[in-house]
Amino acid sequence: MKLLYQIYTILIAWPLFAVDTIITGTLVVIFSLLGDRTYTAYYLPKMWAKIACWLFLIKVNVVGKENISDKQSYVFLANHQGYFDIFLVYGYIGHNFKWMMKEYIKKMPFVGVACIASGQIFVGDSISAIGKAVGKARKTLQNGMSMVIFPEGTRTHDGKMQPFKRGAFMLANEIGLPIVPITIDGSFDIFSRHSAMVSRHPLTMTIHEPITAEQREGKNTKQLMQEVFDVINDGLPEKHRTIANS
């Protein structure tokens, strides 16, 4: 069965996914240049992501959608297990958002152009770069538009969470929006940074209760980082759970 699945992914899933990616990226750039960075820049990638999960025969389970509202803007903070995290969040979070991305993504062929055109939020490592990102985020994250950040900054090497970077939390606190921890599980087993082939495995996204600005009062960045880390970590199965964030 595993061999048949690998043959299917090579001969059918990957080629169709490549075509879907080219079409989606092109349409996002066109509609964004025409002035629509709000709806098509989200709904086209949402369909692209769902098609990816369908093509690779991945079963998706979402828990906790009742914890968020379409009319409220949030900062979603999720662990980063593997490549399929993007498909899971885009396809199934059910909330319009922009990604917070590293500056180097701008230089990626095709992808960088689509991300720039669709108004994604880029951030560097310096304090001044974070300040610029905060300014753009304040203008963008209104009327239900949210932001998704992977606070680890990169994909895990072993399935367990890596220490969080401070930038995401500094930005979230400056904006003052509710923070929503998200636990992603299954992506590491499907296609991790060390994988050569896609494996079939269920994907689960758990949307935890928001942490409001009022609930964060009196907590420093380190305390908030640990709180969010613990919430996400507790939602993982034991094999991927980390003892603490250090």
Image (cartoon, rainbow, N blue to C red):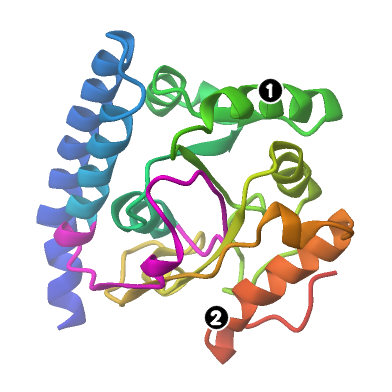
Could you tell me how far apart the alpha carbons at marks 1 and 2 are, in whole angstroms?
32 Å
Quarter location, residue 89: bottom left
- Name the amino acid, label 2: Gly
Q: Which residues are magenta?
A: 53-82
Which labelled disc corresponds to residue 96? none
Measured as percent of width and height from the top left, residue 129 is found at 76, 25
Q: Residues within 10 Å of mark 1 (few under 14, many from 20)?
A: some
| Quarter occupied by the C terminus | bottom right
Q: Residue at horizontal 32%, vertical 9%?
A: 33
- Find out whether residue 77 is within the magenta segment: yes
Q: Residue at horizontal 27%, vertical 74%?
A: 200
Name the residue that disc number 1 marks: 135
Residue 198 higher or lower than 87, as above or below: below
Is 39 left, or right, of 196 in this rendering? left
Please state which of the two labelled residues, at mark 1 or mark 2, is closer to the viewer.
1
Q: Depth check: 123 or 107 in front?
A: 123
Q: Depth check: 100 or 231 in front?
A: 231
Residue 134 higher or lower than 80, as above or below: above
Instruction: Assign a secondary structure to mark 2.
Output: loop
